[in-house]
Amino acid sequence: MEISPESRPDLESGRHLHDLIRRLYPICRSITGPGVRETLSILRDHIPLTVHEVPTGTQVLDWTVPREWTLRDAYIQAPDGTRVVDFRRSNLHVVGYSVPVRATLTLEELRPHLFALPDAPDWIPYRTSYYRESWGFCLAQRVLDSLPEGRYEVLIDATLADGHLTYGEYFVPGSTDREILFSCHVCHPSLCNDNLSGIAVQTFLAKELAANPGRYSYRFLFLPATIGSITWLARNRDRLDRIRHGLVVTCVGDPGRFTYKRSRKGDAEIDRVVPHVLRAAGVEHECVDFTPYGYDERQYGSPGFDLPVGSLTRSSHGRYPEYHTSADDLDLVRPDSLAESLRHYREVVRVLEGNLRYRNLQPFGEPQLGRRGLYRSVAGWLADASDEMAMLWVLNFSDGRHTLLDIAERGSIPFGRIRRAANALLEAGLLEEAAEAA
Ligand code: ZN
């Protein structure tokens, strides 16, 4: 197979993304506890993020930071002494936030604590019980069906005690204090697409942007879902007006088509930039309206905050068969899918960075481009008639009111071409930057 110049760096970036996922995969994460800390400490090998610890009992908006959960071991031992369910084989076996238990039970007594998927009998489901005290095990239906009657020994060696909620934050300053927010959740155990793919893509995006800062400042949050974003919002309430655009990053590693979920506003700049990038790349995608469920976009988009935060995923929340099961594994997320997602995120940032307003300094009649070497030039990119077209669009609509994205959309021209045309016109002294509209 021939490798195009674009796909060569993608192959390598895909491998790096997948390697990071593989490293994070075995860790038993939850909304609090050592798994989140270990995850963040691995990410610190890539980016110098700050780890915040918020004590149990802290009031955050309408919520309270919960007790910290630590799981050491768990199993179910059958009457013949074999461990039919063993946490050491998969951390999905234990219902997240299970209270400790050590008991001997009949199969009938045990059954209400066992969860399986009759429709996918080989997969272990992922379940949690964060805000209701209980315990349970998840297992393959096939294993559940094979359990003989008798007495079972059950152990969940866990601690639920006062401690902290942990989250990671990485801030990359730009030339202004206007921010682009990226947020991913870090609270799922061994689940790849829902959780680890977002963590990996966000980490590598942060690394790239830190090496190449722009006019925006970038803020990257690595949080336990719901309680983490609520905690962050509560602690940063007086600074939220700096957030001009945002994306929740998750489910970006499967081969499914892209989905863009609009912000609650629906017509924010980010809601136009992401579809433009996907369209220009010629990839299959779907745009859906904001809904008050899914991931942390619903906290950023709660009515009191109403931040312009959308979510760019591949297969979306709950809409792929492997979702919240052991089949969301290292095979479901693919290096090429991860690299492609990172590429689109990178392009979204490039468009946001370049989406400015200009004023045509020769607005009476068309300025003579030929005299300035901008028309039918044989050298370089200007040989292309569509670049001339892009210049005419930029000149005509650069009246201080239209952004370059407005112009790109109106002329059905990819943003990159419009941006290049604006750069050439700036260089020729035909444009000046207009102040940003309030
Ligand atoms: Zn999930």
Image (spheres, helix red, strand yellow):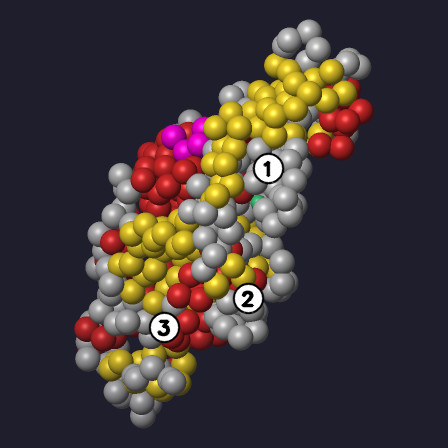
Relative placement, left or right, of 157 versus 363 is: right
Question: Residue 414 or 159: which is nearer the viewer?
Answer: 159
Q: CA distance from mark 1 to mark 2?
A: 24 Å
Which amino acid type is shown beneath numbered disc 3?
Arg
Instruction: Say if the magenta span includes residue 387.
Output: no
Camera-near label (3 vs 1) is 1
Dot 1: element: loop
The quadrant of the picture showing ligand 1 is: top right
Q: Earlier in the sequence, mark 2 or mark 3?
A: 2
Camera-near label (2 vs 3) is 2
- In magenta, the rendered stretch is 23-27
Relative placement, left or right, of 54 versus 66 is: left
Residue position for label 1: 98
Residue sitting at x 61%, y 50%: 131
Q: Quadrant of the C terminus?
A: bottom left
Which amino acid type is shown beneath numbered disc 2?
Asp
Residue position for label 3: 239
**Depicted 374 relative to depicted 202: above or below:** below
Q: Position of residue 78 (x, y in %)?
A: 68, 13
Residue position for label 2: 62
Residue sitting at x 47%, y 57%: 57
Q: Is mark 1 within 8 Å of ligand 1?
A: no
Dot 2: element: loop
Dots 3 and 1: beta carbons under 8 Å? no
**Depicted 191 relative to depicted 178: above or below:** above
